[in-house]
Image (cartoon, helix red, strand yellow):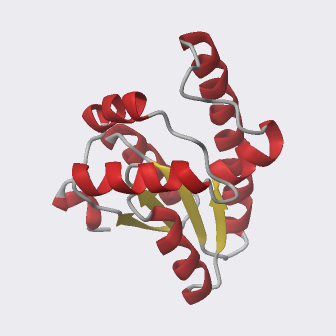
């Protein structure tokens, strides 16, 4: 049975690094939304981006996620594991994808990139300084807001 792997965590938590390892271990299709977004739309957020620019970025991001899910659903039905490297910041979003996997007859697993706020900020600063391919510049003030929005997974979310 194919398994849907969700990479859960904030930027800088190590999700993509772990997703790359899991991709090899499970012979899985890894779909990292930021890599696709950057290739399609470029670097569309900056420190001075206003709310309208962030709204456009978020709408684009949601569109890419929807297209990647369509691909993931097809691949899961073919019996191949899929790794969705989206972040999945809320319990409701994780529950939605657990149900989608179940509807397809696929297994489900959460991989949580847990790191302290200090470590996350340190990593984001380093990442912003070098911007590896397929990553976004993350304005620090927005990142601090995002940390407050993130809902860490509870222990019951890790059981199938």
Q: Spot the residue most to the right.
A: 40
Question: Does residue 158 sit above or below 51 in this rendering?
Answer: below
Q: Is residue 11 visible?
A: no
Tell whether 49 sits left or right of 133.
left
Is residue 136 left or right of 87 when viewed as pictured?
right
* Residue lying at 54% horizontally and 12% vertically, measured from the top left: 51
The structure residue drawn at horizontal position 62% and vertical position 30%, both measured from the top left corner, is 45
- Quarter of the image with the N terminus is bottom right
Q: Identify the residue at horizontal 57%, vertical 66% (top origin).
A: 83
How many marks are shown on the rendered structure? 0
Q: Position of residue 100 (x, y in %)?
A: 52, 51
Q: Residue 6 location, x and y as percent?
A: 47, 60
Question: Above or below — where is 144 with respect to 14?
Answer: above
- In the visual, does 157 lie left or right of 128? left
Residue in the image at 53% along x and 65% along y: 16
Residue 52, placed above or below residue 140: above
Depth check: give the residue in front, 73 or 140: 140
Quadrant housing the C terminus: bottom left
């Amino acid at each position: 049975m194919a398994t849907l792997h969700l990479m859960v965590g904030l930027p800088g938590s190590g999700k993509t690094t772990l997703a790359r390892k899991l991709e090899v271990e499970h012979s899985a299709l890894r779909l990292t939304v930021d890599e696709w977004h950057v290739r399609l739309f470029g670097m569309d957020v900056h420190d001075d981006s206003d709310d309208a620019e962030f709204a456009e970025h978020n709408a684009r991001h949601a569109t890419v996620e929807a297209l990647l899910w369509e691909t993931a659903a097809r691949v899961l039905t073919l019996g191949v594991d899929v790794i969705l490297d989206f972040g999945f910041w809320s319990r409701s979003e994780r529950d939605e994808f657990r149900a989608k996997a179940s509807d397809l007859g696929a297994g489900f697993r959460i991989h949580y990139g847990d790191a302290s706020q200090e470590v996350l900020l340190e990593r984001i600063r380093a990442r912003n300084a070098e911007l590896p391919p397929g990553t976004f510049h993350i304005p620090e003030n927005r990142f601090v807001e995002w940390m407050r929005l993130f809902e860490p997974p509870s222990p019951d979310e890790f059981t199938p």
